Image (tube, rainbow, N blue to C red):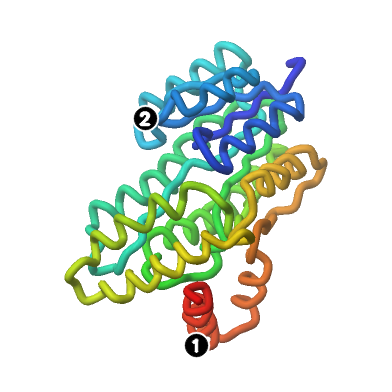
């Protein structure tokens, strides 16, 4: 038996992934971190993590990571599927090619990596797979169709994976972050404005971008990534983790509202929230 369990964290170059890797190192795991930006993980290497460059959409990259871990430690005990990004814009304004790329990163790449870690987990009759979705996996917002579609898909995919792998002692856990202070908003806003410029949805996009920018300027705009890292740590260390954890600012209120409000009432609530953020 290995002296230490091995954790693999994707999207570890910033935000939730980096904070999770730091926490799992503190928890005593051997931590492999992967991302496209290898230089952004240098600080994690100084803390003891093993960093590997990987693009979640490239089969050879994924295979190389799993081969290295298998050679050095036998396999992955804890997989944190965190890598992902968001494209925002009207359904008319986003090309199908962009939409496919969104699914390749947020769902299919994650699924392929998961396929490759499962044989070892089945052999060991143990393992934990943490899938980072979003409150967007249960709710919806204007101009977020393709991103939200990937998160809704990941929720259902994770539920199926959980009941398929339970017989092998594998836990599948969904973590649904709320508003977290990361690079997310910066990466999302400008492309959304560029896509909508001169089009039918330009005013809508400008309103949403303004609301998000003003909201993130506030001192209590969101929760730090460490909030999610702590939840992941709790789930990984639990003998019987929950199937879902919602954490971060507005996560639980939003999920509560979606559960109890009708579609039209929730529509109004979402739009009023955007107007409130602008003020």
Residue lying at 56% horizontally and 24% vertically, measured from the top left:
43
Residue 173 placed where, x, y %? 66, 48
Along the line of sight, the residue nearer the viewer: 74 or 276:
276
Residue 124 placed where, x, y %? 70, 26
Q: Secondary structure at mark 2?
A: helix
Disc tally is 2
Q: Is tag 2's residue or tag 1's residue first in the polypeptide sequence?
A: 2
Question: Which residue is most to the right?
Answer: 239
Along the line of sight, the residue nearer the viewer: 62 or 13:
13
Mark 1 Cα-neighbour bin, 10 Å: few <14, some 14–19, many ≥20? few
Instruction: Give the residue pinned by disc 2.
Output: 59
| Dot in front, 2 or 1 | 1
Residue 1 seen: no
Judge whether 88 appears above or below 277 on screen. above
Judged left or right of residue 180, residue 93 is left
Instruction: Give the residue pinned by disc 1.
Output: 264
Q: Quadrant of residue 18?
A: top right
Q: Quadrant of residue 252?
A: bottom right
Judged left or right of residue 184, residue 166 is right
Residue 55 placed where, x, y %? 39, 32
Q: Secondary structure at mark 1?
A: helix
Residue lying at 60% horizontally and 84% vertically, measured from the top left:
261
Residue lying at 32% horizontally and 64% vertically, measured from the top left:
89
Mark 2 Cα-neighbour bin, 10 Å: few <14, some 14–19, many ≥20? few
Judge whether 82 appears above or below 9 on screen. below
Residue 95 placed where, x, y %? 22, 58
Question: Which residue is most to the top?
Answer: 72
Along the line of sight, the residue nearer the viewer: 197 or 228:
197
Judge whether 58 appears above or below 84 on screen. above
Which quadrant is home to the N terminus? Answer: top right
Q: How much space separates mark 2 and mark 1, taking CA atoms?
A: 42 Å
Residue lying at 70% horizontally and 34% vertically, measured from the top left:
23
């Amino acid at each position: 038996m290995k002296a230490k369990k091995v954790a693999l964290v994707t999207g570890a170059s910033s935000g939730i992934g980096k904070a999770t890797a730091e926490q799992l190192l503190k928890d005593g795991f051997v931590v492999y971190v992967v991302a496209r930006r290898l230089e952004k993980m240098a600080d994690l290497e100084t803390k003891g993590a093993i960093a590997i460059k990987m693009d979640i959409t490239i089969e050879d990259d994924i295979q190389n990571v799993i081969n290295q871990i298998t050679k050095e430690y036998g396999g992955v005990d804890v997989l944190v599927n965190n890598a992902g990004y968001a494209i925002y814009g009207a359904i008319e304004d986003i090309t199908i090619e962009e939409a496919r790329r969104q699914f390749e990163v947020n769902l299919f790449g994650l699924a392929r990596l998961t396929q490759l870690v499962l044989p070892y987990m089945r052999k060991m009759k143990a393992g934990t797979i943490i899938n980072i979705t979003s409150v967007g996996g249960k709710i919806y917002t204007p101009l977020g169709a393709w991103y939200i579609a990937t998160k809704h898909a990941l929720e259902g995919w994770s539920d199926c994976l959980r009941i398929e792998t339970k017989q092998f002692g594998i836990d599948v856990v969904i973590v649904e972050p709320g508003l977290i202070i990361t690079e997310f908003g910066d990466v999302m806003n400008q492309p959304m404005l560029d896509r909508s410029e001169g089009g039918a949805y330009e005013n809508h996009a400008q309103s949403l971008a303004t609301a998000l920018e003003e909201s993130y300027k506030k001192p209590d705009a969101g929760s730090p990534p460490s909030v999610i890292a702590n939840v992941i740590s709790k789930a990984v260390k639990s003998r019987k983790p929950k199937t879902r954890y919602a954490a971060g600012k507005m996560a639980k209120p939003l999920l509560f509202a979606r559960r109890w409000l009708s579609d039209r009432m929730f529509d109004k609530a979402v739009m009023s929230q955007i107007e409130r953020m602008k003020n």
